[in-house]
Amino acid sequence: LALYMLAHSLRQSPSSSARIVCEGRGKEFPLSMLSSPSSSAQAFAEANVGEWAGWQCEFKPDGTLLPVDDRYLDAATIEYGMQPAGFEILCTAAVEGGELQRRFLRILPAEGCACDNLAAEMSVSRVSSDSLDAKVRGDATLRVFTLDDPPGDGGPDWYLRTHFESRAADGARLRTRLSLQWDAAAGQLARGKRARVAVERRWADAGATRSRHISLS
């Protein structure tokens, strides 16, 4: 399933001018505000900026889907075998202060009929322009990029991220993100780790990473 999703996303899409909409100011500014960015770094940042919503699933090394862990579910959901295949996710991203800033919300499954009061886990990612220049590789025409971290501060394994972008029939931007930890010595997915695949649609061109109030309605 993961390979199908990735292959489906890997198709050429029309290129677009590299620009970011400045939230709340009614004007645009170029991605060249990143300090001396490479063309791949510029295109990768442009591909990330905006508001995204989608679905995230995890897979074992053999490609078997891993449903949401029981610790996130109530007893009734488990009893009736209704474990969701993954999590709904929201992402907002913008270039601020010379770095790519991203905030992710992973929406936790509803308990019973509590769909109007969902809980979420939030994580934040900040990538400097220097890191983008050094680590981003890709093809701005095909809209395929990689952002990899070698063994080091994150542990003994490689942390690999691949970003594929495509277009929906209505012209909206779609993306597929694959991330995993790789044991280079063994030539396989790191022991005990999972491959994570997220498929998202961009519904707004500008990200608002400084927002304090988050509405999921």
Image (spheres, helix red, strand yellow):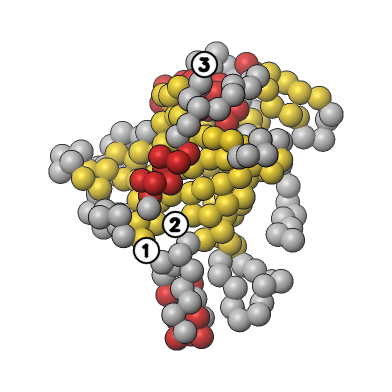
Tell me the residue at 35%/51% (across/down).
195
Mark 2, secondary structure of its residue = strand
Residue 123 seen from this side? yes
Mark 1, secondary structure of its residue = strand
Quadrant of the image occupied by residue 145: top left
Q: Amino acid at mark 2?
A: Cys
**Residue under numbered circle 3:** 39
Q: What label does residue 88 carry, if any?
A: none
Tell me the residue at 39%/57% (across/down).
58
Q: Position of residue 14 (x, y in %)?
A: 59, 24
Give the mark nearest the N terminus, 2 or 3: 3
**Residue under numbered circle 1:** 66
Furthest toward the right, the residue is 26
Q: Amino acid at mark 3?
A: Ser
User: Which numbered disc, 1 or 3, marks the residue closer to the eye?
Assistant: 1
Whether the residues at callouts 1 and 2 have beta carbons within 8 Å, the answer is: yes
Q: Residues within 10 Å of mark 1 (few under 14, many from 20)?
A: some
Q: Nearer the viewer, residue 63 or 13?
A: 13
Tell me the residue at 35%/56% (across/down).
59
- Residue 184 vertical position relative to residue 77 in the rendered view, above or below: above
Q: Residues within 10 Å of mark 3 (few under 14, many from 20)?
A: some
Q: Position of residue 160 (x, y in %)?
A: 35, 38
**Residue under numbered circle 2:** 57
Tell me the residue at 34%/40% (across/down).
159
Quadrant location of the C terminus in the rendered image: bottom right
Q: Is residue 158 left or right of residue 131?
A: left
Furthest toward the left, the residue is 186
